[in-house]
Image (tube, rainbow, N blue to C red):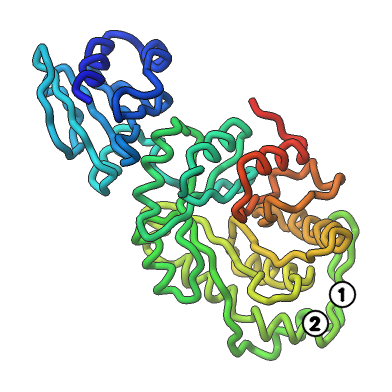
């Protein structure tokens, strides 16, 4: 490790673009991540792993030129240089965010293709693939996801933004805890609760026409079922939006309508979004339960896309494994690709089927 750090020290006069190709695939037990090499004055910050343990290395030509905030084991190098071996701690994640602001998460953007990424062994490869395709990653993991996400983003040199998924929450306090833990996106899981019976009267017996002239009719049974399942969801979302975290930094909201084993009906989708908009509430992603049969999926996809295009500003979560209808391939900005353990090759094939090309 010391010899490797000494080599980095000797290269500090060069640019990042010049140094990265010179890094070996492996040096002793250390495997560097070349894309992660970044210069801060007369110091270099680099991610990698030693015998499978992830590390962050900071090499500077003197102790006084070590960047502020990084914590780790110091080793003296020749000519007054110093090596700092840093673990993947919260303090070091904070230092990366401070020195490289693009390492800080944000809320998912309003209109962009997005995809979920589990912080597992293939996370870096998936993030890199998404970055090359202009896809916004939403990273999820265990309770330390917000910390690990910073190191993964830094290691991939992904500067186009990302979100940290705080998971699903059924209460305002659960949302607050997720946001306090560093999440910038949280999904609300509605639970049946009493709602004003008059709410059904706003829908029963009415047709709602989308911008492409598709009609959705609510009979009294459909209206009553929507109110019974989702009648208080908009109020729940309003309480979450009122949390102080919304003032300190933006966060995105997801809505889970996939809690039932039955496919989400277009009427349920329309009801929920219309009630949210009546309260001036925006969401980022809507999670639906899709039919398994391909023809039924294609029909449901067209109907849900029609509703989403009419209201705008959010995306529909679709599993990577689903084959999108041909006439839906041009609507990539409306989709959030949800992971389900697919190998990286299948994800690449999905992009190609959707008409996306790496850039």
Residues at marks 1 and 2, CA–CA distance in whole angstroms: 9 Å
Residue at 69% x, 83% y is 227
Q: Position of residue 134 (x, y in %)?
A: 61, 35
Number of residues whose C-alpha sits closer than 10 Å to that of mark 1, classed few (under 14), some (14–19) or many (20 or more): some
Res. 332 visible in picture: yes
Residue at 48% x, 38% y is 124
Of residues 69 and 84, the one nearer the viewer is 84
Horizontal side of 6 relative to 53 (left or right) equals: left
Dividing the picture into quadrants, the one containing residue 301 is bottom right
Q: Secondary structure at mark 2?
A: helix
Dividing the picture into quadrants, the one containing residue 26 is top left
Res. 96 visible in picture: no
Q: Position of residue 352 (x, y in %)?
A: 74, 36
Upstream in the sequence, badge 1 or badge 2? 1
Q: Secondary structure at mark 1?
A: strand
Horizontal side of 297 relative to 154 (left or right) equals: right
- Check the picture and name the quadrant holding the N terminus: top left
Q: Position of residue 153 (x, y in %)?
A: 43, 38
Q: Position of residue 201 (x, y in %)?
A: 77, 85
Q: Does residue 294 sit above or below 150 in this rendering?
A: below
Residue at 85% x, 83% y is 219
Does the CB distance between marks 1 and 2 fall below 8 Å? yes
Horizontal side of 213 relative to 116 (left or right) equals: right
Horizontal side of 231 relative to 77 (left or right) equals: right
Q: Does residue 189 sit above or below 62 in this rendering?
A: below
Mark 1, residue position: 217
Residue at 80% x, 82% y is 222
**Residue 222, disc:** 2
Number of residues whose C-alpha sits closer than 10 Å to that of mark 2, classed few (under 14), some (14–19) or many (20 or more): some
């Amino acid at each position: 490790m010391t010899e490797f750090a000494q080599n980095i020290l000797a290269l500090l006069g060069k640019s990042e673009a010049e140094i990265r190709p010179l890094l070996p695939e492996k040096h002793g037990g250390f495997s560097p991540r070349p894309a992660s090499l970044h210069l801060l004055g007369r110091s270099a910050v680099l991610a990698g792993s030693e015998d499978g343990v992830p590390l962050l290395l900071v090499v500077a030509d003197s102790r006084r030129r070590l960047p502020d905030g990084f914590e780790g084991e110091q080793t003296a190098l020749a000519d007054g240089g110093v090596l700092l071996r840093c673990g993947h701690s919260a303090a070091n994640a904070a230092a990366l965010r401070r020195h490289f602001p693009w390492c800080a998460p944000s809320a998912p953007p309003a209109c962009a293709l997005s995809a979920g990424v589990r912080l597992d062994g293939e996370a870096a490869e998936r993030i890199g693939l998404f970055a090359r395709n202009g896809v916004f990653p939403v990273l999820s993991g265990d309770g330390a996801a917000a910390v690990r996400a910073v190191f993964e983003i830094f290691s991939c040199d992904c500067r186009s933004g990302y979100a940290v998924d705080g998971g699903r929450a059924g209460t305002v306090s659960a949302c607050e805890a997720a946001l306090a833990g560093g999440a910038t996106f949280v999904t609300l899981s509605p639970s049946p609760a009493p709602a004003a019976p008059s709410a059904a009267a706003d829908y029963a017996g009415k047709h709602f026409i989308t911008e492409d002239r598709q009609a959705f009719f609510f009979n009294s049974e459909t209206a009553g079922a929507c109110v019974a399942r989702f009648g208080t969801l908009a109020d729940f979302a309003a309480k979450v939006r009122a949390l102080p975290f919304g003032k300190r930094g933006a966060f995105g909201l997801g809505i889970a309508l996939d809690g039932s084993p039955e496919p989400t009906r277009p009427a349920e989708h329309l009801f929920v979004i219309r009630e949210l908009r009546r309260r001036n509430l925006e969401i980022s992603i809507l999670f639906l339960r899709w039919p398994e049969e391909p023809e039924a999926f294609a029909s449901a996809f067209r109907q849900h896309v029609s509703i989403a295009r009419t209201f705008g500003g959010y995306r529909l979560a679709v599993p990577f494994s689903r084959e999108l209808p041909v006439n839906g391939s041009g609507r990539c900005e409306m989709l959030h690709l949800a992971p389900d353990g697919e190998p990286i090759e299948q994800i690449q094939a999905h992009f190609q089927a959707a008409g996306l090309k790496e850039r």
